[in-house]
């Protein structure tokens, strides 16, 4: 008996070993097959592997084929929170003995540690690659070092943001994406010792748009200025003509208190300021540090090379970089691509097919049904003297009316799908292209699957990550083909709608202006003229400033419009952002009920005015806004005739000139841009639970050099008693916070104001509650009178 059991055990062991051997041979064969594949692939994700949430990830693909020609698909995938998989793929043709490099763009939903990048041929995976990524929180800053001396800029990693840190990514020209969406995770780029002339036209356009959206570009001069500037024509604040050797070192006391390096000869890039640039340090003969704004971003030029002696290793660079590159203005909702979900869904759902039939239509059906099944049926049966047939006629009439109601509803829904596109288009002075953020609502009158195709340069991505059935049993699947993207087999139920987001670039409407902000010892004003030199009319246009706003009507091509606006903000902040969309558009509920186009406009505008914390978060900015009545071909349904609805809101950020007198100048609250210690805080409303203090840093929105400070006024209001609050200002002489004495709510004139305003007009304010674990202010902003 035992011998029989031993034989069975030995048989089981032998069978197990044989199965394992077969499995290992199979795996080995598979591995060898991949290792011996004539196709090789290398994938790099993000910037030095760094990625950020809700920011496009550029995946740089290098693929080489040493075998016969094939048609392949590169697929980058990751698992999302609901365990489904998002796949972003690209079709690529690989001729014999070919090598190709391109970018595949992936939109992240949530965080993940790696991307699975596979090369697939005929539904078979030929090459697999697991690409690691490092997730950065949105509060962290990412600095791209486009330099051959990265160690010279390692001090940048020591910069602290208001709630995060700074990370450095070492890059080269080939790692810069060819689509603007791929640059979103970068906050700062440093250019030193790299030939920017190698930038492709697509990379250069992407760079311009990245700066306009809020990026900071630091370009180094020194002896290698020519290659650093080769591909940056028109961007720089200095027109460099050559170099000079000088022992000149400018006054940088406004930026750092560190002692200067030992005086010795510096090689400086020499030249003149370009139009719109401002000198931050140096002289007219030799600008040392200059800055030029482009949209919400900036280009900074440093005439010397920090990597060379005697400036290498100088401790003052940290303070200078902190001032130049670490000031974070709270973005507007439209610039960050955010939508208020409820209002956006309202705009997308405002179509005839999803509307409720009129009360007259419904009542007519009810009355007709009651009349037919009641008195008319009775009269008819009485006439034919067959009232006993009522048990037959009533069900028949019910069936007939039900069928008629169904057919009526079927035709009411229509037979073709509806593509409802709502778009926000952002443009800036000095940039020929504009960014378009679009939401697509695909309505289907019947159960169907649709294929969506984006326009040139537009990328598709999932809008509502809670929709686990967006594309059937998978989270997302799209195919990148050259400059457009295709999303196939989007299932929609009868009378249902699916929403997909699109991000892309469109030509900007050409706007020229002669706007000037006139500073004086009273309230600043903006005057001048606007001209639409493009071919499109901006309907119902308005001008919005940090103070007031004004309706200017339709802005037709080549018809100048005069502008005269005050830049005095109310106690609640910029007037435009204290209103709701109906007040701005001049609508009432009857207009919204009776006009679908106006209703969509109202909901779209309300989705942009939404504030996450309910406060007026409008920072500095002057905008021309209006509606475009032309189709924006961001995406379309392939192979199907669809009803297309377009609602497009156009926002152009204007950059006026500044005119100031020789005498005293008053800077009102609207003339400052600001950075706060928390997203919940603004100068026009602040509440922070769990923390008993907050800080706000104010800087003049337009370049001002302060020679003398005549007055500094704090404008303060709170529901909390001033007896429990401490309001402090940074003392630039002492280098510390100083509490204001006998503080009260209202307009508080600061004693010895010059101690709290530096040479660049900067003021730092701190508010603390000494008795509570929260702090609240309904107003905390400043004004000052200075002599430039």
Image (cartoon, grey):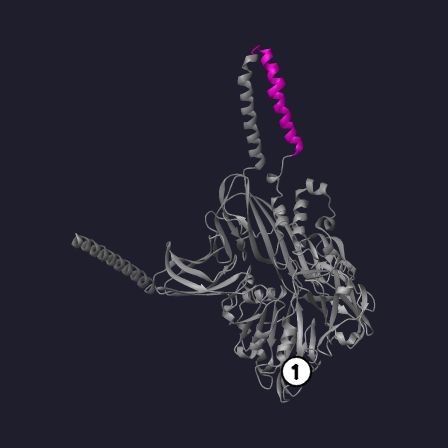
Q: Is residue 219 above or below residue 392?
A: below
Where residue 716 appears, x then y in whole percent? 77, 63
**Nearest the camera: 735 or 496?**
735
- Residue at 57% of width from left, 11% of height from top? 384
Where residue 472 appears, x then y in whole percent? 47, 47
**Nearest the camera: 100 or 443?**
443
**Residue marked by disc 1:** 258
- Residue at 54% of width from left, 17% of height from top? 391
> Number of labelled discs?
1
Q: Is residue 317 left or right of residue 769?
A: left
Q: Residue furthest front?
A: 1
**Element type at mark 1:** loop
Q: Main secondary structure of the magenta part?
A: helix
The stretch of residues the image draws in magenta is 358-386
Q: Is residue 8 left or right of residue 111?
A: left
Query: Toward which corner of the image does residue 331 lie, by quadrant?
Result: bottom right
In the rendered image, residue 67 lying in the magenta stretch gets the answer no
Residue 700 seen from this side: no
Residue 430 seen from this side: yes
**Nearest the camera: 226 or 571?**
571
Q: Is residue 196 above or below residue 113?
A: below
Where residue 497 appears, x then y in whole percent? 55, 44
Where residue 514 appears, x then y in whole percent? 74, 64
Q: Is residue 411 above or below residue 469?
A: above
């Amino acid at each position: 008996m035992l011998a029989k059991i031993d034989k069975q055990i030995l048989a089981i062991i032998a069978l197990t070993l044989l199965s394992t051997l077969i499995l290992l041979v199979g795996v080995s064969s598979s591995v060898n097959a991949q290792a011996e594949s004539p196709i090789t692939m290398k994938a790099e994700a993000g910037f030095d592997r760094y990625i950020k949430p809700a920011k496009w990830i550029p995946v740089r693909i290098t693929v080489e084929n040493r075998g016969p020609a094939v048609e392949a698909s590169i697929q980058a995938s990751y698992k999302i929170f609901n365990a489904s998989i998002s796949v972003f793929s690209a079709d690529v043709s690989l001729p014999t003995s070919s090598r190709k490099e391109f970018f595949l763009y992936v939109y992240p939903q949530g965080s993940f540690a790696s991307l699975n990048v596979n090369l697939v041929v005929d539904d078979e995976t030929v090459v697999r690659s697991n690409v690691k990524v490092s997730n950065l929180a949105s509060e962290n800053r990412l600095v791209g070092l486009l330099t051959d001396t990265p160690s010279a800029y390692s001090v940048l990693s020591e910069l602290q943001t208001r709630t995060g840190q700074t990370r450095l990514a070492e890059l080269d020209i080939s790692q810069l994406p060819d689509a603007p969406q791929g640059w979103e995770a970068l906050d700062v780029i440093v250019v030193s010792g790299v030939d920017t002339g190698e930038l492709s036209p697509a990379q250069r356009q992407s760079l311009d748009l990245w700066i306009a959206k809020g990026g900071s570009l630091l370009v180094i001069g020194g002896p290698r200025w020519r290659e650093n500037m080769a591909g940056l024509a028109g961007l720089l604040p200095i027109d460099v003509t050559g170099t000079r050797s000088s022992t000149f070192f400018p006054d940088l006391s406004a930026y750092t208190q560190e002692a200067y390096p030992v005086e010795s000869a510096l090689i400086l890039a020499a030249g003149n300021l370009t139009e719109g640039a401002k000198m931050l340090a140096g002289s007219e003969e030799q600008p040392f540090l200059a800055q030029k704004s482009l949209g919400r971003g900036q280009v900074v030029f440093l005439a010397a090379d920090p990597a060379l002696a005697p400036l290498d290793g100088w401790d003052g660079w940290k303070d200078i970089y902190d001032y130049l590159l670490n000031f974070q203005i709270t973005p507007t909702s439209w610039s960050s691509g955010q939508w208020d979900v409820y209002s956006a869904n309202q705009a997308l759902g405002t179509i005839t097919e999803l509307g409720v039939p009129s009360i007259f239509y419904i009542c007519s059906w009810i009355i007709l049904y009651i009349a037919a099944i009641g008195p008319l049926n009775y009269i008819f049966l009485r006439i034919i003297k067959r009232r006993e047939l009522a048990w037959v006629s009533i069900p028949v009439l019910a069936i007939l009316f039900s069928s008629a109601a169904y057919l009526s509803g079927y035709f009411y829904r229509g037979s073709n799908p509806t593509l409802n596109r709502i778009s926000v288009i952002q443009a800036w002075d000095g940039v020929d292209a504009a960014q378009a953020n679009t939401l697509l609502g695909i309505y289907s009158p019947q159960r169907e699957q649709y294929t969506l195709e984006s326009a040139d340069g537009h990328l598709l991505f999932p809008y509502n990550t809670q929709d686990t059935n967006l594309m059937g049993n998978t989270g997302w699947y799209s195919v990148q083909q050259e400059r457009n993207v295709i999303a196939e087999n989007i299932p929609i139920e009868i009378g249902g709608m699916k929403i997909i987001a699109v991000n892309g670039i469109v030509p900007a409407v050409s706007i020229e202006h002669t706007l000037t902000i006139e500073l004086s010892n009273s309230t600043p004003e903006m005057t001048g003229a606007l001209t639409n030199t493009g071919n499109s009319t901006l309907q119902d246009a308005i001008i919005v400033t940090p103070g007031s706003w004004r309706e200017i009507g339709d802005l037709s091509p080549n018809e100048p419009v005069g502008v005269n606006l005050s830049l005095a903000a109310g106690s609640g902040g910029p007037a435009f952002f204290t209103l709701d969309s109906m007040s701005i558009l001049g609508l009432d509920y009857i207009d919204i009920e009776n006009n679908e186009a106006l209703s969509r406009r109202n909901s779209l505008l309300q989705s942009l005015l939404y504030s996450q914390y309910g406060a007026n978060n409008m920072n500095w900015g002057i905008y021309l806004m209006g509606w475009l009545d032309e189709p924006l071909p961001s995406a379309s349904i392939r192979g199907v005739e669809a009803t297309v609805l377009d609602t497009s809101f156009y926002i152009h950020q204007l950059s006026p000139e500044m005119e100031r007198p020789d005498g005293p100048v008053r800077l009102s609250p609207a003339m400052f841009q600001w950075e706060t210690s928390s997203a919940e805080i603004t100068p026009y409303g602040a509440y922070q639970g769990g923390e008993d203090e907050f800080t706000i840093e104010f800087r003049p929105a337009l370049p001002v050099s302060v020679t003398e400070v005549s007055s500094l006024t704090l404008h303060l209001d709170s529901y909390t008693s001033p007896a429990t609050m401490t309001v402090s200002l940074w003392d630039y002489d002492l280098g510390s916070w100083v509490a204001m004495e006998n503080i009260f709510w209202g307009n508080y004139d600061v004693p010895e104001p010059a101690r709290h305003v530096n040479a660049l007009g900067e003021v730092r304010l701190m508010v603390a509650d000494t008795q509570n674990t929260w702090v609240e202010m309904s107003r905390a902003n400043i004004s000052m009178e200075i002599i430039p």
